[in-house]
Image (tube, rainbow, N blue to C red):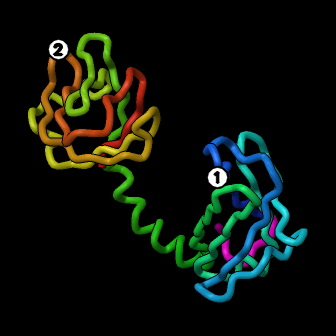
């Protein structure tokens, strides 16, 4: 969330307390900035918009985003309360200084796509037809971050790499499930 900027939204999935189904009733948000007092949202007396399937959103005003940490607590009669914490970003100059330092590292990132045409991926092994580095162990010790599919945003380390029948074959520390054909990743 951007610090001290209007026109943003925050949302939470709400569940009915009795049966854990999507909650579609009225929801009010309470705002707490930097661990201060919690107050009802200032826009529309904290009234949230039900977007569908139990997902409710609130559009805080500028002052409600003028904290380093903002907690939005969503409350509905008969619903399980949900709190969303947002750390704000502010000084774009400081952020740019950090990203400028990261730019050279970005050129060392390797992207790939899982191929299950020949080898059936598991939670510890997979192949990528678009990675064809011939040197065995070339990627050992590097991190792999999943950028699509069921493993999106999971990260693990590469324990072994080899080129097998023209495809990069990776052994990694176990993920929660096997990657699927077409899942994408980045090697750092």
The label number, if any, that marks residue 165 in the structure image: 2
Q: Secondary structure at mark 1?
A: loop
Which residue occupies 76% across, 60% down? 77
Identified at 37% across, 38% down, the residue is: 185
Q: Which residue is mark 1?
A: 17
Q: Which residues are magenta?
A: 1-7
Q: Is residue 94 above or below residue 140?
A: below
Q: What element does badge 2 sit on?
A: loop
Q: Is residue 130 visible?
A: yes
Marks 2 and 1 sit apart, C-alpha to C-alpha, by 54 Å
Q: Looking at the image, can residue 13 be seen?
A: no
- Judged by depth in the image, the label closer to the viewer, 2 or 1, is 1
Asked which quadrant contains residue 31, the reply is bottom right
Seen at 68% across and 88% down, the residue is: 37
Count neighbours of disc 2 (C-alpha within 10 A) and say few if under 14, some if 14 to 19, many if 20 or more. Answer: few
User: Magenta stretch: residue 76 in it?
Assistant: no
Q: Position of residue 116 (x, y in %)?
A: 31, 16
């Amino acid at each position: 969330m951007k610090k001290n900027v209007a026109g943003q939204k925050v949302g939470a999935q709400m569940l009915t307390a009795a049966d854990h189904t999507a909650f579609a009733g009225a929801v009010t948000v309470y705002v707490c900035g930097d661990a201060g007092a919690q107050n009802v949202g200032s826009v529309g007396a904290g009234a949230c918009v039900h977007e569908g399937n139990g997902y409710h959103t609130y559009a805080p005003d500028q002052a409600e985003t003028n904290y380093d940490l903002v907690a939005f607590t969503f409350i509905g009669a008969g619903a399980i309360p949900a709190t969303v914490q947002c750390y704000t970003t502010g000084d774009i100059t400081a952020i740019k200084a950090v990203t400028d330092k990261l730019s050279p590292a970005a050129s060392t990132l390797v992207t790939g796509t899982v191929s299950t045409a020949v080898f059936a991926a598991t939670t510890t092994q997979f192949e990528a037809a678009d990675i064809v580095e011939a040197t065995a162990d070339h990627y050992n010790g590097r991190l792999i971050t999943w950028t699509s599919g069921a493993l999106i945003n999971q990260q693990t380390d590469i324990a072994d790499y080899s080129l097998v029948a023209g495809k990069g074959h990776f052994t990694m520390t176990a993920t929660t499930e096997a990657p699927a054909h077409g899942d994408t990743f980045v090697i750092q």
